[in-house]
Amino acid sequence: MKLWAVLFALALTLPARADEGALHFHFILHGRYTDFRNQPQPTLLFDPSTRGFDTSTYLSPQGEDSYLSTFISAGVDGQRGRFSFALTADSGELRSQTFPLLAPVCFSSLSRSGLELSGSGRCNTVVAGRRTLFPIEETLLAHPELTSNGRSIADEASATLFIREAWVAMTFGKNDFGLLRVGRKRFNVADGFVYDDWGTGLEANLDLGALGPSFDVGAEVFYPTRDVPEAEGWGSLMLSVHANYLPGLFEHVGVFGAYFRDRANAVVELFRGSLAEASVVKLENSQLGSTTYVNESRRLVLEFDQPLNGAADLGWAGTSGALSFAGMKLEFTGALAFGQLTIPDVTVSDVTTVRLATQTNYRANTLLGELAHLRLRRSIGSKVELGGFFIYLSGDQPPMVKAAEGLAARYDGFLGVSPYVTDTNIFFNGGISESFAARQATAPGVNGRGVIAPGLTASYDPFTTFGIDGRAAYLVAPSIGPFGGRVYGPEFDLELNYTPVRWLTLAAEGDVLFPGDFFPAGPAVTKVVLGFDLVPL
């Protein structure tokens, strides 16, 4: 029997024994209309009309994505004596999406790009030890389909069963100072910079404040993915520990550490967006029909066709806190990331031979990254709050790019497994949909280049039912990008919230990012969101 079934059955036994009124039901419905324009395109697609890759759109701000989306969540939690449980299911972000079609690509010595389409009669190059047709994403799009969290409904159902929470817990000791919890829950490591998402595992926590000393210590071991783990998945676990001093209510100062042994390709997948980067530069700087152009086009096909396999052993150590003083609130996080990751690299021999030799090498890269995050806020009267923030996520050229350039096998970016950062609405995917919108974990910044972002915040709540929040930030990359620049650009965000009744909130958001020289020239990136939140229970 699968683990999810055991947890589900165990959770259902508790409410049957719970006291009258000990069960709490909740239901949430979110609705959104989103208009997102000129997003930098992170993927490189094959153009059937030219028989080559369309490098002109790579990282270029362009296009429009307008859609309606919804999110439905329902659950129950309960408690009886020392035992408690929670069971929650949700739909994920439901929306209509279009995905690129797959083009059946072959190698050909008769094509100036070295590539052709199956059925053209021009496929005449044999790849040593490999099949000769490769399904590669192309510029043409398939028909729209309904998706959940960015993948088909069938895939989401198979991977998660739409169950987000399914845990049981027990408290123990004097004043219930100890807690043991097992099952599926939301885990948070390093204030979300390493991990903040659903996972399955075990949590142990000791609230020593219940005994007198103002300390909290705990440990977690879990499988870091939203998907329900299969038996083989338990070889890739994350362990995290923390110890906090609690000087006052909602205040803490502490240290944390974490270790992740990845044998399921979670870390290497963070670099999927940078696979094409080195090839784009080479293709644009070489002549169509040249050996360099043909070799690079074919190497891209082989890279996109094969699974992105790799391994990692990563550790994190740092400190975090939340303090109040002199009418101000300070939050901070600082950490180091270290370890080793193994990244695949595909090489292709000279194409003058009919029989093309290919080889996949695995390169071990050491890792040393840094994180610094500060947020300071101060209330001005009862209606206004002003503040500022600073975020630094170290970055570097992606390991694939450094390998292609013969550079040292070391990556100096701060890697997280599934980070959840919402300091701005466009660059960091924050905003009024941040808590439920589908998101994809990526390396820090754009293609692992990291980010430095000082910013200002302001909030104005003229009424208890109406509020305005604004943010501004200037974003740059610590490491130079593929087009020679470091400036991501300035971003400005504005959010409005109106709650006419307790169970209904209306929200609006408008954001703009003016792309800097990190990207090819393009128009401003804009996002407009209109929505409602219905919480009747």
Image (cartoon, grey):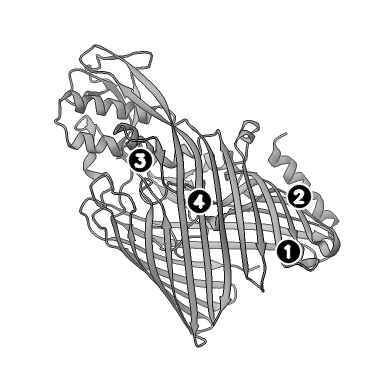
Mark 4 surroundings within 10 Å by alpha-carbon count, few (fewer than 14), some (14 through 19), many (20 or more) = many
Earlier in the chain: of badge 2 and badge 3, it is 2
Earlier in the chain: of badge 1 and badge 4, it is 1
Q: CA distance from mark 2 to mark 3?
A: 42 Å
- Whether tag 3 and tag 1 are in contact, CB under 8 A, the answer is no
Label 3 is placed on what type of residue? Ser
**Residue mark closest to the camera, 3 vs 1:** 3
Q: Position of residue 516 (x, y in %)?
A: 25, 58
Earlier in the chain: of badge 3 and badge 1, it is 1
Label 2 is placed on what type of residue? Ala
Earlier in the chain: of badge 1 and badge 2, it is 2
Mark 3 highlights which residue?
274
Q: Position of residue 441 (x, y in %)?
A: 47, 47
Label 4 is placed on what type of residue? Leu
Mark 2 highlights which residue?
11
In the depicted structure, whether residue 19 falls above or below residue 406: below
Mark 4 highlights which residue?
336
Mark 1 highlights which residue?
24
Q: CA distance from mark 1 to mark 2?
A: 14 Å
Tag 1 secondary structure: strand
Label 1 is placed on what type of residue? His
Q: CA distance from mark 1 to mark 4?
A: 40 Å
